[in-house]
């Protein structure tokens, strides 16, 4: 070391050592006055979470380190985006961060405020939430959940994962029409928006758009809170009639009302000569032309295709349905 032109070798004199110690202490005091007191680090400062509405909430950790000794505490704000759990109230500490279940996909800023010697050092942290992948696995008729081709105007159920909210949510009418977006879920067949009856994380019920008439297949896509599914290819047919049943199977007791509006069953059979009402979907295009999501009004629609009813393999009648119900009179 060179001091005032002198070359010094060996141990420093005590006076010199004390002088250097005083200079260091003075420098720390000056840093303290300027707020440069603790060498605090936070890592990482960017967290990304991906989860669906029915998935367990994910967690991630932020490690806070303090390179010097002293009394140091911290807090996190705001608390409207995440919940936190710290391993200690002073540094060093590990903070476990969990996003709230109500967060929609997006970016949310939080701040970790470090307090030391009545001073504060702020670390901004970016929380990014992305929706879980939306996946379509099957499309079935809504009447009896059978698979196969679907027709324009048919009520269907789309099955998959992360299709909608964890709690089943039904439509709210707008100007006597079903909406094409419910609780963040929207569905398109060949880019035509579909009226939605209900949505949930595992199933969405929609009406196939009438604009698909004359086409043989449709590319079906679902969007939930900005996350898009891969396109699902669905075969189409001019008609795909199905009666609504009282179970979730493709066969069994159909939904039928007797002439007194009671539910038809083996214990409550319809008498000969009486009228029963059956409920069906998949009749195809209608006259007047059907309007996607529109409720039946004063003008009843009728399918353009011929409609016949057989019971036990025997042709009973040809009839003209109205809307989604058909009525027939039992003759035997």
Image (cartoon, rainbow, N blue to C red):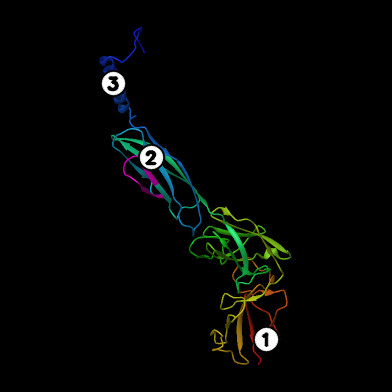
Front tag of 2 and 3: 3
Image quadrant assignment for residue 70: top left
Quadrant of the image occupied by residue 243: bottom right
Residue 315, how many percent across, how many down?
Answer: 71, 85
The quadrant in which residue 272 appears is bottom right
Residue 253 image point, x, y percent: 59, 82
Mark linked to residue 21: 3
Q: Quadrant of the N terminus?
A: top left
Helix, strand or loop at mark 3: helix
Query: Which one is earlier in the sequence, the residue at label 2 or at label 3?
Result: 3
Name the mark on residue 263: none
Name the residue beneath numbered marker 2. Answer: 64
Which of 18/149 is in front? 18
Task: Of the two numbered discs 1 and 2 on the same chain, state the one appearing first in sequence.
Answer: 2
**Given contact means CB atoms under 8 Å apart, are the residues at marks 1 and 2 in contact?**
no
Residue marked by disc 1:
312
Magenta segment boundaries in residue numbering: 81-95
Residue at image location 68% in from the left, 80% down from the top: 320
Residue 268, magenta (yes or no): no
SS at badge 1: loop
Q: Residue furthest toward the top? A: 5
C-beta proximity under 8 Å, tags 2 and 3: no
Q: Is residue 81 visible?
A: no
In three-dimensional space, the C-alpha distance between marks 2 and 3, rounded to whole angstroms, equals 30 Å
Q: How many marks?
A: 3
In the rendered structure, does residue 82 fall within the stretch colored magenta?
yes
Please rate how many residues cluster around mark 2, counting C-alpha atoms within 10 Å: few if below 14, some from 14 to 19, many from 20.
many
Percent x, y for residue 289? 68, 69
Q: Earlier in the sequence, mark 1 or mark 3?
A: 3
- Quarter holding the C terminus is bottom right
In the depicted structure, whether residue 12 falls above or below residue 244: above
CA separation in Å, label 1 and label 2 = 75 Å
């Amino acid at each position: 070391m060179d001091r005032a032109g002198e070359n010094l070798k060996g141990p420093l004199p005590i006076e010199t050592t004390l002088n250097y110690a005083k200079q260091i202490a003075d420098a720390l005091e000056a840093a303290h006055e300027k707020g440069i007191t603790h060498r605090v680090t936070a890592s990482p400062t960017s967290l990304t979470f991906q989860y669906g509405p029915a998935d367990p909430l994910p967690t991630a950790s932020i490690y806070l380190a303090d390179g010097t000794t002293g009394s140091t505490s911290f807090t996190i704000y705001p608390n409207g985006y995440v919940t936190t759990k710290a391993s200690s109230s002073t540094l060093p500490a590990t903070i476990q961060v969990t996003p709230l279940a109500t967060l929609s996909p997006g970016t949310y800023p939080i701040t970790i405020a470090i307090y030391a010697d009545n001073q504060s050092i702020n670390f901004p942290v970016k929380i990014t939430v992305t929706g879980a992948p939306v996946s379509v696995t099957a499309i079935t008729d809504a009447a009896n959940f059978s698979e196969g081709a679907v027709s324009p105007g048919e009520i269907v159920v789309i099955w998959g994962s992360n299709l909608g909210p964890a709690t089943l949510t039904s439509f709210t009418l707008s100007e006597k029409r079903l909406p094409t977006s419910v609780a963040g879920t929207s569905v398109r067949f060949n880019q035509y928006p579909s009226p939605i009856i209900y949505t949930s994380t595992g199933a969405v019920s929609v009406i196939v758009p009438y604009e698909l008439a004359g086409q043989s297949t449709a590319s079906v896509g679902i969007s939930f809170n900005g996350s898009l599914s891969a396109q699902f290819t669905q075969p189409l047919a001019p008609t795909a009639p199905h009666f609504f049943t009282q179970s979730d199977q493709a066969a069994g007791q159909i939904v039928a009302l007797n002439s007194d509006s009671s539910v038809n069953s083996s214990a409550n059979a319809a008498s000969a000569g009486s009228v029963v009402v059956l409920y069906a979907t998949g009749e195809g295009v209608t006259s007047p032309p059907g309007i996607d999501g529109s409720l039946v009004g004063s003008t009843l629609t009728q399918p353009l295709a011929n409609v016949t009813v057989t019971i036990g393999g025997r042709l009973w009648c040809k009839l003209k349905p109205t809307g989604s119900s058909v009525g027939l009179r039992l003759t035997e």
